[in-house]
Image: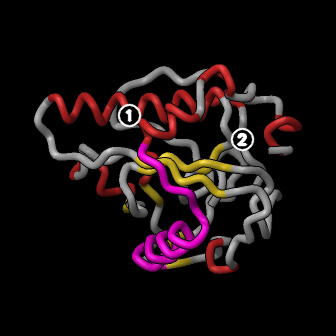
């Protein structure tokens, strides 16, 4: 679940560190190894079948998951793929960019008169146990979204993106590659 790299429904240029930092599929944790954040497009889990992306132009492609022929969501385990679920990040410059881009996109949509929910940041503290049903082996998409919502309701600090940005200044973010610093937080 940790580490799916988002791409957005609108065009952006990704920083080099974004493109080269891949989380290992060998790194499976039973608890959060650092304080991590998830930039959600809404107050609840909104993962969807990536094959529906063309019919969901207002949804972030980052929320799209690959569903197998049997209807289940499996982890992405190929060397060059990202995980197949909610993308969590430490408070690095990359996360700051993701949050700001998502919030700007929300403001643009709002200015255009589109009804969209403001993005939310879910913060999970270091050491929070990861329930076994979230260590993705396989799951139905509806069950995965429900399980994520239950987990967020129990363990996440939920903040509107603008409030989160007010509390997490860009200059206080950690360099993306300095994992020793952000793993300690």
Instruction: Give the number of callouts.
Output: 2
Q: Secondary structure at mark 2?
A: loop
Residue for point 80% across, 44% down: 185
Reading the chain from its start, which is encountered first: label 2 or label 1? Answer: 2
Please state the horizontal and vertical placement of residue 20, each as a whole percent of the image.
70, 30
Residue for point 32% across, 32% down: 105
Can residue 36 be spotted in the picture?
yes
Q: Main secondary structure of the magenta part?
A: helix
For the record, the magenta segment spans: 140-160
Q: Would you say residue 57 sits in the magenta stretch?
A: no
Please state the horizontal and vertical placement of residue 13, each as a whole percent of the image.
48, 20
Q: CA distance from mark 2 to mark 1?
A: 24 Å
**Residue 11, numbered label:** none
Q: Secondary structure at mark 1?
A: helix
Q: Nearer the viewer, residue 166 or 10?
A: 166
Which residue is label 2 attached to? 22
Can residue 70 be spotted in the picture?
no
Which residue is label 1 attached to? 103
Please state the horizontal and vertical placement of residue 184, each as a whole percent of the image.
86, 44
Please state the horizontal and vertical placement of residue 148, each as a whole percent of the image.
52, 70
- Horizontal side of 3 relative to 161 (left or right) equals right
Callout in the foreground (2, 1)? 1
Q: Based on the displayed image, in which of its 4 quarters is residue 93 positioned?
A: top right
Q: Nearer the viewer, residue 15 or 160?
A: 160
Q: How is the image coloured?
A: secondary structure
- Horizontal side of 123 relative to 185 (left or right) equals left
């Amino acid at each position: 679940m940790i580490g799916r790299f988002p791409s957005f429904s609108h065009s952006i240029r990704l920083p080099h560190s974004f493109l080269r930092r891949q989380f290992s599929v060998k790194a499976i944790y039973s608890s959060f190894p650092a304080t991590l954040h998830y930039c959600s497009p809404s107050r609840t889990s909104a993962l969807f079948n990536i094959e529906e992306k063309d019919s969901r132009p207002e949804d972030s492609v980052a929320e799209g998951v690959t569903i197998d022929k049997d209807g289940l969501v499996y982890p992405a385990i190929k060397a060059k793929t990202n995980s197949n679920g909610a993308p969590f990040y430490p408070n690095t410059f990359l996360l700051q960019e993701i949050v700001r881009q998502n919030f700007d996109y929300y403001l643009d949509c709002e200015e255009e008169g589109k009804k969209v929910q403001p993005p939310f940041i879910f913060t999970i503290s270091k050491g929070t146990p990861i329930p076994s049903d979230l260590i993705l082996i396989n799951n139905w998409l509806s069950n995965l979204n429900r399980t994520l919502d239950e987990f967020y309701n129990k363990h996440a600090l939920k903040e509107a993106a603008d409030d989160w940005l007010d509390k997490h200044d860009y200059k206080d973010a950690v360099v993306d590659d300095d994992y020793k610093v952000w793993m300690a937080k």
